[in-house]
Image: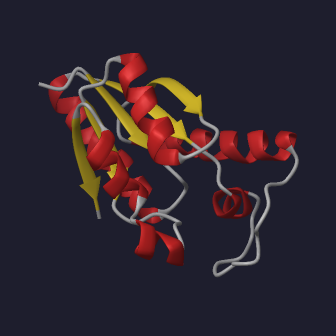
Amino acid sequence: MFNKIVVGIDGSETSENALKAACEMASKFGSELHLIHTPQPKTVAFAMGAVAGYHTVTTMPAPEEVEKAGNKILDSGKDIAKKHGQTIHQTYLGAGDPASEITDCAEKCGADLIVTGRRGLGNLSALIQGSTSLKINHIAKCACLSVI
């Protein structure tokens, strides 16, 4: 039913739940799992060990730090998949708008499902503008699943 599943993660608990759900589906359907993370100021701060509630990040750190933090989140995702008996076929480190990066990734790899957490590390602006998962649901050309 689903041959290729793209999972967008940001290091949040809901994105981990999304990955776990994708692992269950991959196990059932024999799907390839593709993992993507698009660093944003708060996800970089989170990956670099900032305390919960850290809201003062407004600019991105140096590119090397962003890549290191992004790879840390992707490695964590690989570990979660491994614990659930799955391997990640490919990882992607995006740059820019997460919803656009995730949907572009899904199109490029021929995914027939995108799985994301319903609420990640987004902020107050997401309540006004809409969440990443909501935007993905509007622009994706394949099935989408938002996990709580």
Q: Quadrant of residue 33?
A: top left
Against 19, residue 28 (above or below) is above
* Residue at point 71%, 76% (across, down): 51
Residue 71 seen: yes
- The image quadrant of residue 115 is top left
Residue 45 on image: x %, y %? 73, 63
Question: How many numbered circles does the render carry?
Answer: 0
Image coordinates for residue 36, horizontal then vertical, percent:
51, 37
Residue 4 lies left or right of residue 15; in this view the side is left
> In the visual, does 43 lie left or right of 25?
right
Residue 134 placement (x, y as % from top left)? 32, 57
The one of 73 and 111 positioned closer to us in this rendering: 111
72 is higher (above) or lower (below) than 54 = above
- The answer to whether any part of residue 87 appears in the image is no
Instruction: Give the image location of residue 102, x and y in percent.
Output: 45, 37
Q: Please, which residue is most extreme toward the left here?
A: 1
View extreme (bottom): residue: 53
Q: Residue at x 53, y 53 (%)?
A: 10
In this picture the colour scheme is secondary structure
Picture quarter with the N terminus = top left
Residue at coordinates 23% horizontally, 20% vertically from top-left?
3
Residue at the front extreme of this rendering: 129
Residue at horizontal 50 percent and vertical 62 percent from the top: 12
Quadrant of the image containing the C terminus: bottom left
Asked if 13 appears above or below 94 in the picture, the reply is below
